[in-house]
Amino acid sequence: EAGVAQSPRYKIIEKRQSVAFWCNPISGHATLYWYQQILGQGPKLLIQFQNNGVVDDSQLPKDRFSAERLKGVDSTLKIQPAKLEDSAVYLCASRGHSWAGTKPYEQYFGPGTRLTVT
Amino acid sequence: AQRVTQPEKLLSVFKGAPVELKCNYSYSGSPELFWYVQYSRQRLQLLLRHISRESIKGFTADLNKGETSFHLKKPFAQEEDSAMYYCAPYSGGHGSSNTGKLIFGQGTTLQVKP
């Protein structure tokens, strides 16, 4: 089966610019997560979707970050405007049910997008 | 507050030596705990889950509720074990609502020298 896909893999922007990341989860996975991983730290959950609804966005800096999953499949995460401290790897993960052919408790991660803000 | 601590940023051992990666958690209720691993140039992936009591790639992890610890152990380290390891308590359910989430520790880099 295909894994979680993310694009772009790398992005360099200047502060105050905008950027968007895209994620395509494993087919059939209803739950989708976006994480921010700053260098030297573990992944921090930004937002969690269940189908196209938001389950948890308590740690999403909503003044500059937004995310959507309109049709309950692909998702985009946007930063506008970016700050230097947003430099990080942005990970997308998905989780499904056993009928989707994956372990229901396991999160499957994408390769991540490395963002550098200069 | 839910918190997980991995006190060692780097653990360096020689091949064949025993390995113990420490994880302590502060959690309400009965958490489910996982270890995730990221090998060089690979994706973050699940290593093992405490409920299953399995041994994956020679690694085991025992949940000690009294000490609130979930240390990862392997009796004889191999060079291919070199990676970043994350302890991750899980909160929430696995049912149809699927609203659970992982909280990751800061990670420990395991370096196995030849």
Image (cartoon, rainbow, N blue to C red):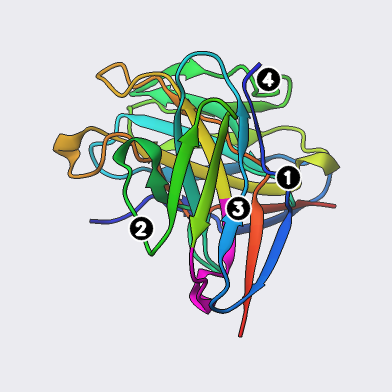
The chain letter under disc 1 is: B
Horizontal relation, residue A60 to residue A47: left or right:
right
SS type, badge 3: strand
Residue type at numbered disc 1: Pro
Disc 1: which residue: B7
Residue type at numbered disc 4: Lys
For the residues beneath circles 1 and 4, the answer to whether they share a chain is no
Asked if the stretch drawn in magenta spans residue A91, the answer is: no
Q: Please tell me which residue lies in front, B58 or B96.
A: B58
- Label 4 neighbourhood size at 10 Å, few (<14), some (14-19), many (20+)? few
Please report the residue visible at 52 percent of the width from the left and 50 percent of the height from the top: B72
Tell me if label 2 and label 4 are in contact, CB under 8 Å: no
Disc 4: which residue: A62
Q: Which mark is residue A61?
A: none
Disc 3: which residue: B21
**Residue A58 % position (x, y):** 61, 17
Residue type at numbered disc 3: Leu
**Label located before the other in sequence (2 or 3):** 3
- Label 1 neighbourhood size at 10 Å, few (<14), some (14-19), many (20+)? some
**Residue A21 % position (x, y):** 56, 44
**Label located before the other in sequence (2 or 1):** 1
Disc 2: which residue: B56
For the residues beneath circles 2 and 4, the answer to whether they share a chain is no
Give the answer, above or below, for where A51 lies relative to A9: above
SS type, badge 2: loop
Residue type at numbered disc 2: Ile
* Nearer the camera: disc 1 or disc 4: 1
Q: Please tell me which residue lies in front, A58 or A80.
A: A58
The chain letter under disc 2 is: B
**Residue B36 % position (x, y):** 48, 49
SS type, badge 4: loop
* Nearer the camera: disc 2 or disc 4: 2
